[in-house]
Image (spheres, grey):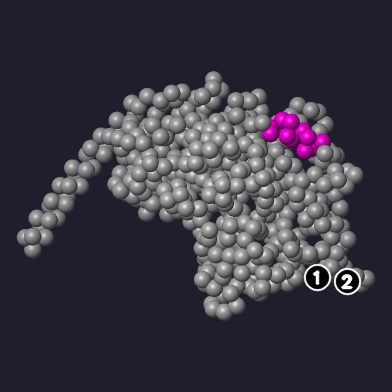
Amino acid sequence: MRTRTCFAAAASLATLAFASPALAACEDLASLQLDGGEVTSASVVSAGEFAPPAGMGPPPGVSGMAYENLPGFCRVELALRPSEDSDIRSEVWLPLQGWNGRYAAVGNGIWAGSLSYAEMGRNLTRSYATAATDTGHVGNGMTAEWAVGHPEKLVDFGHRAVHVTTVAAKAVVEAFYGRPPEYSLWNSCSTGGRQGLMAAHRYPDDFDAISAMAPANPMTDLMVQSMWAGWQAQRFGVSLSPADFAMVHGAVLAQCDALDGLQDGVIGRPLQCGFQPASLQCRAGESEDCLSPGKVRAFEAFYDGVRAEDGTALLPGWPRGSEMQLMVLTMGPEPFPVATSYFRDLVFGGQAGWDWRATGYRDYVDAARSYGAEILDVPPTGLEAFFARGGKLLMSHGWNDGLIPATNTLAFYHGLYNATPAARRDSQMRLFMVPGMDHCAGGEGPSEFDTLGTIDAWATTGIAPDRIVATRPVQAGGMPGQPPMPPREPMERPLCPYPLVAVYDGSGDTGVAGSFTCAFE
């Protein structure tokens, strides 16, 4: 008993001896000098004591965080002003104990306007120093009104805020721990995926490895595609209900599920799926469980992609299988507000009488790019410097994504592949397409996999990933306020580097990744 008491007392003294210097070191960061900005607060947050600001939830596609499980950390708040009209708010979180020597940054959703606290928390629990930024404005992310009359704020959102946050965060890390991070990593989805690509393009020295999932790139084209999807119901004079999307999705599954050799409720080869909406068109006397001619044409337009008035293809459409989430873009009186705001407030701002229904889509594409491509878009030919310094790029996208077409990422990857020397693309870039996954997470297929751990291992070992195991949670996510979905069978699948796909070996448990091989179709 005496030995235990002495040991406990010694442990308490050791903890106090560690905590006091850590507290002092954290508070000392308040006086750290930063170029183009300042530290506005530096304080220790005890384990389980962090509470995010009211109403500050995670971005779309990102699950919440159990903040009561966070370890103690040093919270450093920054105000960065790279231009006279900049007001970028960022935070750096530093583990008090067990720092793994790495820095991992996270991005934003839609038009940003808040910090991704949930993603920062997940990094912190894995012993990473981490940071996030609001990109220079505060808002719900659904509109771009904050950029009206503020071109420098659009530049901050487009690329500059992430860069100046990264530079400042690395300075904070070095001041706190006495050494810079061994590796700097970017791990994010959606707008965050675009931000990762943008960092590789404009600031190739910022990160050693980048995970860009479902990147909203090219953003200007995505705005046009969102407008297109939201126009189709009105274009053809119909009202598309959730039941319509569910019926079409069920028919797609019935026709194309087994194309990968296994009937498992997941479409593994959507580009080979030949489903035609006309197969569901109502026949004479039918009025239920079928589609009117106008609804058929609307679904055909989703798949075919953006077309000019003469029928010329302009931008890709959505893959078959993405119907359930696609309805988010189609069911309002106007198209998705993220896109309508881009055109109404910025591209056509100040033009009296602009009518989103009457604008031609060739004009939409040209105007969208002319206004914002230089600031918002990442060209597939623009990553040479990042690869030249040894950077690693992991891209991924869910085939069922209804908010950002997976075909956009395929087009970018093809351009990047053709622009990159063979030796570098084989060792420094990978694309993993995820069957059955929605936007950033969720869906019918296995959608949980460790992108951060993958790029960390890639950066430290130099060995490119050739297989990532994804799992499907037993409890599917549901709509807020609705009763939980019924539990489902667990499922594992290997994700394969594109263009390889997972092929069932013909024997073994179909719910286990080990029963599948990555092979060419």
Q: Is residue 209 magenta?
A: no
Q: x, y percentage for residue 155?
A: 60, 29
What kind of element bears circle 1?
loop
Determine the residue positioned at 65% across, 55% down. Answer: 401
Image mark count: 2
Along the viewing direction, whichever of 393 and 69 lies nearer the viewer = 393
What residue is pinned by disc 1?
Answer: 289
Task: Give, as a three-letter code, the residue at label 2.
Answer: Glu
Asked whether residue 65 appears in the rendered view, the answer is no
Residue extending farthest right = 284
Residue at image position (48%, 56%) is 450
Instruction: From the top left corner, tell me how far across and down residue 233 is, in percent.
Output: 81, 52
Q: Is residue 501 left or right of residue 453?
A: right
x and y, in percent, of residue 320 in the image: 73, 60
Q: In the picture, residue 222 is in which quadrant?
A: top right
For the N terminus, which image quadrant? bottom left
Residue furthest to the top in view is 84
- Dominant secondary structure of the magenta stretch? helix
Magenta-highlighted residues: 363-373
Residue at 67% x, 45% y is 418
Q: Indicate left or right for 55 with 146 as reference.
A: left
Q: Is residue 372 magenta?
A: yes
Q: Is residue 233 found left or right of 90 in the rendered image? A: right
Label 2 secondary element: loop
Give 180 or 7, whichever is nearer the viewer: 180
